[in-house]
Image (spheres, rainbow, N blue to C red):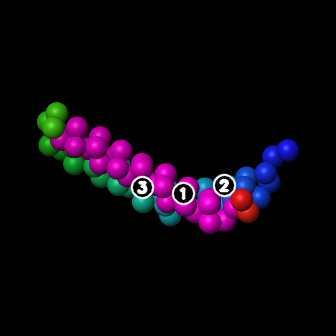
Amino acid sequence: MPNYPAQAALIEALRDWRRHVVALAGVALAFGVASSLGSNVAYYTAALITFTIWMAWFVLTAVEVIRLADL
């Protein structure tokens, strides 16, 4: 039997569009700067920044799901 409160909490946590926009803007900015510099080190740094942004987005979303869910 599916846990509907947990599913509803996940859907609600993923509706926070501001978190998605900030993450996407950060990734776009990192790769925009890397493309303007044009070096391998800049692209590597942009990839590390992107990974950090993704991890922060994931943790913040997971915390929100746990906060909202009836577990």
Which label is found at residue 61? 1
Dividing the picture into quarters, in which one does residue 31 lie? Answer: top left
Region rendered in magenta: 42-69
Counting residues from the start of the chain, the first of labels 1 and 2 encountered is 2
User: Which residue does the numbered mark 3 point to in the structure image?
Assistant: 56
Give percent across and percent down for residue 69: 69, 61
Looking at numbered disc 3 in the image, what kind of residue is underneath it?
Ala
For the residue carrying disc 3, how many other residues have a C-alpha within 10 Å: few (<14), some (14-19), or many (20+)? some
Does 31 appear above or below 20?
Answer: above
Cα–Cα gap, marks 1 and 2? 8 Å
Dot 1 lies on which element? helix
Extreme residue in the top direction: 40
Q: Is residue 23 visible?
A: no
Residue at image coords 79%, 51% = 3
Say whether disc 2 or disc 3 marks the residue closer to the N-terminus: 2
User: Is 31 placed left or right of 67 in the picture?
Assistant: left
Please state which amino acid type lies under the numbered disc 2: Leu
Give the amino acid at mark 1. Answer: Thr
Q: Is residue 65 magenta?
A: yes
Give the residue drawn at x 49%, y 60%.
Answer: 60
- Residue 10: mark: 2
Of callouts 1 and 3, the N-terminal one: 3
Q: Residue furthest right?
A: 1
